[in-house]
Image (spheres, rainbow, N blue to C red):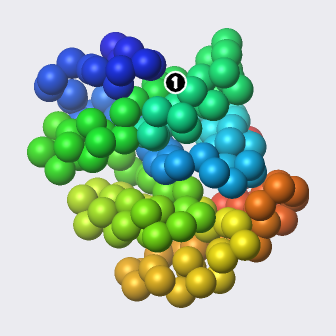
């Protein structure tokens, strides 16, 4: 089991255990709508029977932890660097990954996850520079993009345009 504060987990993760889970990658939570979008996607995934794993920076993890205090939407919260290491070492894998992007670092995380995972990577791009960040992504993927920072509605609408929810 993962410790939500430290991100520590058992050294040998069974990749089959993650077959029905989606990874949500969060960098710095500087833009307010990131947390709302994460919880929205996690809630929709849960309704579809897909577990959710957050990999984030310390501040991003705490915002999600306190935003979903009873664990309704999020199954696990892990340290971002630890997850990247585990995925690179083939100790963890996920069929679906959402990378939340509002700056250059987010683009780097998306490229990293795209190169390491065999599954589908969805860049979720937002903030005042969303179009610029979207243009920086040079790998084949379906991007979820909205120029929005405070009002989550444009980003939620973009998510719903790209993803077809069964539940």
Residue 39 visible to the viewer: yes
Q: Quadrant of the N terminus?
A: top left
Q: Is residue 27 left or right of residue 143?
A: left
Question: What residue do we see at 66% from left, 76% from top?
Answer: 129
Image location (x, y in percent) of residue 83: 30, 39
Question: What residue do we see at 69% from left, 54% from top?
Answer: 31
Q: Classify mark 1: helix, strand or loop.
A: loop
Q: Is residue 28 left or right of residue 157?
A: left
Dot 1, crowdedness within 10 Å: few (<14), some or many (≥20)?
Answer: some
Picture quarter containing residue 13?
top left
Question: What residue do we see at 66% from left, 21% from top?
Answer: 66
Q: Quadrant of the C terminus?
A: top right
Image location (x, y in percent) of residue 65: 60, 23
Q: Is residue 148 above or below residue 42?
A: below
Q: Is residue 68 left or right of residue 84?
A: right
Task: Check disc 1 and report the residue beneath it.
Answer: 75
């Amino acid at each position: 089991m993962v410790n939500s504060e430290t991100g520590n987990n058992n050294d040998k993760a069974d990749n089959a255990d993650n077959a029905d889970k989606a990874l949500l990658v969060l960098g710095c939570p500087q833009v307010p709508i990131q947390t709302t979008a994460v919880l929205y996607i996690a809630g929709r995934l849960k309704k579809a029977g897909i577990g959710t794993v957050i990999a984030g920076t310390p501040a991003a993890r705490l915002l999600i932890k306190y935003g979903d205090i009873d664990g309704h939407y999020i199954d696990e919260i892990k340290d971002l660097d630890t997850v990247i290491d585990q995925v690179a070492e083939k100790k963890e894998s996920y069929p679906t990954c959402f990378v939340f992007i509002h700056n250059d670092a987010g683009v780097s995380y998306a490229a990293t996850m795209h190169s390491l995972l065999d599954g589908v990577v969805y860049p979720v791009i937002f903030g005042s520079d969303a179009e610029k960040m979207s243009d920086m992504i040079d790998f084949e993927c379906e991007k979820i993009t909205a120029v929005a920072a405070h009002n989550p509605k444009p980003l939620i609408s973009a998510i719903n345009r790209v993803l077809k929810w069964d539940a």
